[in-house]
Image: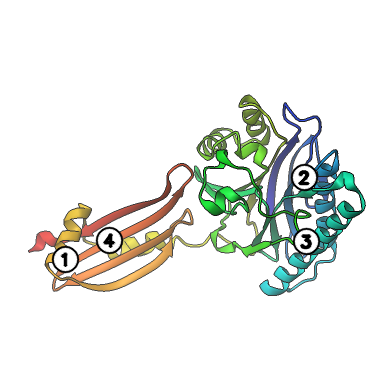
């Protein structure tokens, strides 16, 4: 598997020091940039990229983020082979819980570190599979063919309550913050193809640059420093950390067939595109039988469905794709095909 990684961690314009930190395999990065291409057999050498955004009084935020990523890098060295999803989840959950307890204990012993904690967002490539790990409100996105898709969910009051992010920045979960830490650990291999770019970032980027603008930048000039500079242009009032990791499956894994398009082309053979309203009306009025339902994903990883209706020689195929838009929420794209002109 080949990786092209471009990363930057910057203090921004308003903070005295940088409490963010990046982890790229085993390299810890703060106040620096990174730009490398390399190839790894992830069955032999797992690969991890992570961002941690520290918080706390005095300089304890940078201690927290450094501790989280340093201990995570150590844990990678002890990672066994041929682990199941459950074994892998348990390994990283227990590791992060131990890091959490260590930070809590430091804060108990040293009043200057009271409130110390850090977010964690990471993507793990293990034995030709892909996973993400999340605790906090740093984010993971996937960028593919001009479309940016948010993968992680913020552990924040805004996300939980459906508030606008600009109205509250209350964090509900972090490593070291609170009595316990909750860890998201999910496999995302089924939504990854060769050529995908993953964006991991702290909220110093996403609070100042909206998802649509990030999408536009990645489409035109996919450089970490361009994203950092955009956040600075908009005020730079927090530390800004960005990892852009593009993956190329050069061995063992190939891009899956586009099942959605194959099924659509197969089912719509001999049919003409028709108005969705007219198709729905015709199906109801003629009591057409629902013959087949295909649930799949399109080439961008969006949920897709193909419904095939038939009655005698009449056939109508209706496709629906649900696309998550950064600015408009869930969008539904329906298309209908039919041969009702035969009547």
Q: Position of residue 296 (x, y in %)?
A: 42, 65
Above or below 314: residue 197? above
In the structure shown, which secondary structural element does the residue marked by tag 1 occupy? helix
Of residues 174 and 29, the one drawn nearer to the viewer in this rendering: 174
Q: What residue did someone put label 3 on?
A: 96
Dots 3, 1 in contact, CB < 8 A: no
Q: Position of residue 164 (x, y in %)?
A: 52, 42
Q: CA distance from mark 3 to mark 1?
A: 54 Å
Q: Position of residue 156 (x, y in %)?
A: 62, 50
Depth check, mark 2 against mark 1: the one in front is 2
> The N terminus appears in which quarter of the rendering?
bottom right
Depth check, mark 4 against mark 1: the one in front is 1
Which mark, residue 54? Answer: 2
Q: What residue did someone put label 1 on?
A: 284
Dots 3, 4 in contact, CB < 8 A: no
> The C terminus appears in which quarter of the rendering?
bottom left
Earlier-in-chain disc, 3 versus 4: 3
At 36% from the left and 65% from the top, the residue drawn is 263
Circle 1: is it few (<14), some (14-19), or many (20+) Cα within 10 Å?
Answer: few
Of residues 10 and 272, the one drawn nearer to the viewer in this rendering: 10
For the question of whether residue 84 can be seen, the reply is no
Which mark, residue 318? Answer: 4
Depth check, mark 2 against mark 4: the one in front is 2
Of residues 88 and 272, the one drawn nearer to the viewer in this rendering: 88
Earlier-in-chain disc, 4 versus 1: 1
In the structure shown, which secondary structural element does the residue marked by tag 3 occupy? helix
Q: CA distance from mark 2 to mark 1?
A: 57 Å
In the structure shown, which secondary structural element does the residue marked by tag 2 occupy? strand
Q: CA distance from mark 4 to mark 1?
A: 13 Å
């Amino acid at each position: 598997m080949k990786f092209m990684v471009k990363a930057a961690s910057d203090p921004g314009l308003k903070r005295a020091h940088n409490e963010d930190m990046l982890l790229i395999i085993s390299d810890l990065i703060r106040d620096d940039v990174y730009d490398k291409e390399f190839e790894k057999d992830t069955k032999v050498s797992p690969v991890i990229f992570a961002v941690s955004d520290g918080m706390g009084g005095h300089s304890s935020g940078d201690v927290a983020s450094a501790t989280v990523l340093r201990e995570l890098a150590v844990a990678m060295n002890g990672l066994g082979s041929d682990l199941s999803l459950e074994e892998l989840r348990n390994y990283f959950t227990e590791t992060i819980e131990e890091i959490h307890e260590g930070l809590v204990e430091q804060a108990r012993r040293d009043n200057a570190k009271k409130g110390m904690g850090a977010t964690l967002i990471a993507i793990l490539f293990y034995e030709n599979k892909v996973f993400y790990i999340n605790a906090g409100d740093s984010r993971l996105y996937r960028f593919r063919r001009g479309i940016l898709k948010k993968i992680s969910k913020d552990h924040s009051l805004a996300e939980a309550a459906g508030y606008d992010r600009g109205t509250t920045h209350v964090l509900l979960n972090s490593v070291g913050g609170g009595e316990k830490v909750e860890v998201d650990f999910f496999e995302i291999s089924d939504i990854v193809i060769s050529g995908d770019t993953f964006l991991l970032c702290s909220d110093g980027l996403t609070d100042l640059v909206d998802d649509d603008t990030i999408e536009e930048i990645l489409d035109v000039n996919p450089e970490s420093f361009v994203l950092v500079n955009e956040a600075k242009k908009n005020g730079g009032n927090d530390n800004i950390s960005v990892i852009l990791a593009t993956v190329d499956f050069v061995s063992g894994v190939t891009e899956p067939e586009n099942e959605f398009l194959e099924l659509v082309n197969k089912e719509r053979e001999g049919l003409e595109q028709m108005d969705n309203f007219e198709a729905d009306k015709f199906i109801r009025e003629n009591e057409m039988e629902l013959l087949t339902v295909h649930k799949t994903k399109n080439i961008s990883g969006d949920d897709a469905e193909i419904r095939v209706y038939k009655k005698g020689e009449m056939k109508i195929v209706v496709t629906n794709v649900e696309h998550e838009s950064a600015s408009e929420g869930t969008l539904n794209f329906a298309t209908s095909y039919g041969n009702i002109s035969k009547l």
